């Protein structure tokens, strides 16, 4: 037993844990700064948000410790069980959950709330890793593709029904994991093309766009005639693309909420609403820009101190970092995330167990999605969809779920020589 404990301590990737702790500490300090006022000066005030976050940090560290000391095979053996439990919870929250900011995605417990969709990302990662680590699994097989897509699609659709579009979209990032495991590159190219076509359909008259697509189709066919590219294949793709273009307006008008459409139109420059939809992003950019190179200093951010930026301790917490720590501090935080994700990819590639490798890529992909979208929306490059910055944004569900997600992989990696 003693030798086993010593071996575990030696094999744990302490660099990853230290990076995690650094991000959590930065988050706690940033939350304190974002909500600081003269009435709540003590950083240990449990009535303030930073005090509550301290409680969540303590709970998360206990979760991390528990994960590190249990048998690593527990996660692969119970993957489907945890997946099923949180599917039930996602269904339950639709029926009896509390509505917050238009999304019915919370279970309220006194002053605290639990958001099952945050944990569902981790359980979906476990289930996906389990199904892809099967002996006869092959991503070229239609049955495997269907099973993998179903595992991801069920929680995604349930979260979408909760009117939590931001969290639902995060599930799309699992396609990167499927690509690593052998999914054809053409699928990614097709998905990217559909996304581009959707955006173009919003800014260009659909009939003009269809005319352009027809000309492009003819040109592609002509350039590839020597390769015997079928004209029928080209025409089939054209008809499909034209159908997508003509259906975008209907989907856009009927599937999206008015505030979601407003955000997209503002991002595309089709609409200006500085006191409404654009207000959050404009104030965030002002806060980040005002930080300059070295920042205004701790507790000296005027934009955040006087609450000009809504949600400055949750979805827009990066603007607090940008204003107080400036360009240097922002680059440092971004660097920590990039280092962590690169580290996780290297760890995933050194796994002997396919389950561990797939799960490692799931962890990296989820972190990448949250990191990219959250920072992208605070600087106006992406529409505001309301997802937290991992380990930094205020929120117990978010912090515990990301801790759970990360430390399961750290535990798998520490026992990689024993897992096959």
Image (spheres, grey):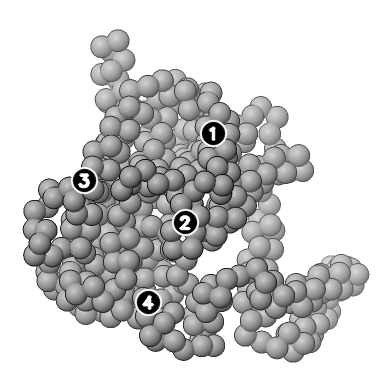
> What residue lies at 75% left-to-right and 74% top-to-bottom?
247
Q: Specify whether 140 is left or right of 333.
A: right
Q: Specify whether 198 is left or right of 291.
A: right
- Snapshot quadrant of residue 295: bottom left
Query: Marks 4 and 2, Cα distance to the nearest angstrom?
Result: 24 Å
Q: Are marks 4 and 2 in contact (CB under 8 Å)?
A: no
Mark 1 element type: helix
**Residue bearing the label numbered 2:** 99
Q: Residues within 10 Å of mark 4 (few under 14, many from 20)?
A: many
Whether residue 264 is situated above or below residue 180 in the rendered picture: below
Nearer-N-terminus badge (3/2): 3
> What residue lies at 66% left-to-right and 76% top-to-bottom?
253
Nearer-N-terminus badge (1/4): 1
Nearer-N-terminus badge (1/2): 1
Mark 4 element type: helix
Between label 1 and label 2, give the one nearer the viewer: 2
Between label 3 and label 2, give the one nearer the viewer: 2
* Residue 287 in picture, x, y percent from top left: 25, 76
Q: Are marks 1 and 2 in contact (CB under 8 Å)?
A: no
**Residue bearing the label numbered 3:** 54
Nearer-N-terminus badge (3/1): 3
Residue 85's disc is 1
> Residue 186: in sight, yes or no?
yes
Nearer-N-terminus badge (3/4): 3
Query: Marks 3 and 1, Cα distance to the nearest angstrom?
Result: 28 Å
> What residue lies at 53% left-to-right and 72% top-to-bottom?
260
Between label 3 and label 4, give the one nearer the viewer: 3
**Residue bearing the label numbered 4:** 281
Q: Residues within 10 Å of mark 3 (few under 14, many from 20)?
A: many
Query: Marks 1 and 2, Cα distance to the nearest angstrom?
Result: 21 Å
Q: How many marks?
A: 4
* Residue 75 in picture, x, y percent from top left: 48, 27
């Amino acid at each position: 037993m003693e030798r086993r404990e010593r071996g575990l301590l030696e094999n744990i990737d302490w660099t990853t844990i230290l990076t995690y702790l650094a991000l959590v500490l930065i988050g706690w300090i940033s939350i304190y700064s974002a909500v600081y006022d003269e009435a709540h000066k003590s950083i240990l005030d449990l009535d303030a948000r930073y005090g509550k976050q301290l409680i969540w940090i303590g709970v998360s560290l206990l979760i991390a410790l528990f994960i590190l000391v249990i048998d690593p095979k527990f996660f692969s053996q119970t993957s489907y069980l945890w997946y099923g439990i949180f599917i039930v919870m996602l269904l339950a929250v639709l029926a009896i959950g509390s509505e917050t900011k238009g999304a019915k995605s919370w279970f309220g417990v006194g002053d605290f709330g639990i958001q099952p969709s945050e944990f569902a990302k981790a359980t979906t990662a476990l289930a996906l890793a389990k199904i892809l680590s099967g002996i006869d699994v092959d991503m070229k097989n239609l049955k495997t593709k269907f099973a993998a897509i179903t595992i991801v699609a069920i929680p995604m659709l349930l979260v979408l029904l909760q009117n939590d579009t931001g969290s639902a979209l995060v599930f799309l990032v699992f396609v990167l994991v499927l690509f690593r495991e052998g999914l054809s590159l053409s699928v990614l190219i097709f998905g990217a093309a559909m996304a581009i076509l959707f955006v173009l359909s919003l800014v260009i008259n659909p009939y003009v766009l269809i005319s352009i697509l027809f000309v492009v189709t003819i040109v592609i066919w002509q350039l590839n005639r020597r390769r015997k590219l079928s004209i029928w294949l080209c025409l089939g793709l054209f008809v499909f693309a034209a159908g997508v273009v003509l259906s975008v307006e209907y989907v856009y008008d009927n599937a999206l909420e008015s505030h979601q459409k407003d955000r997209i139109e503002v991002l595309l420059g089709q609409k200006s609403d500085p006191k409404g939809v654009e207000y959050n992003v404009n104030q965030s950019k002002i806060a980040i820009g005002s930080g300059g190179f070295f920042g205004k200093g701790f507790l000296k951010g005027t934009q955040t101190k006087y609450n000009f930026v809504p949600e400055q301790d949750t979805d827009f917490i990066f603007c607090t970092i940008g204003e107080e720590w400036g360009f240097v501090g922002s680059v440092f935080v971004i660097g920590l995330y990039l280092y962590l994700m690169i580290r996780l990819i290297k760890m995933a590639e050194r796994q002997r167990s396919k389950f561990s490798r797939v799960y490692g890529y799931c962890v990296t992909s989820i972190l990448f999605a949250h990191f990219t979208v959250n920072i992208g929306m605070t600087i106006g490059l992406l529409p505001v969809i309301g997802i937290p910055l991992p380990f930094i944004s205020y929120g117990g569900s978010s912090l515990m779920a990301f801790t759970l997600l990360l430390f399961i992989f750290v535990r798998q990696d520490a026992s990689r020589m024993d897992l096959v």
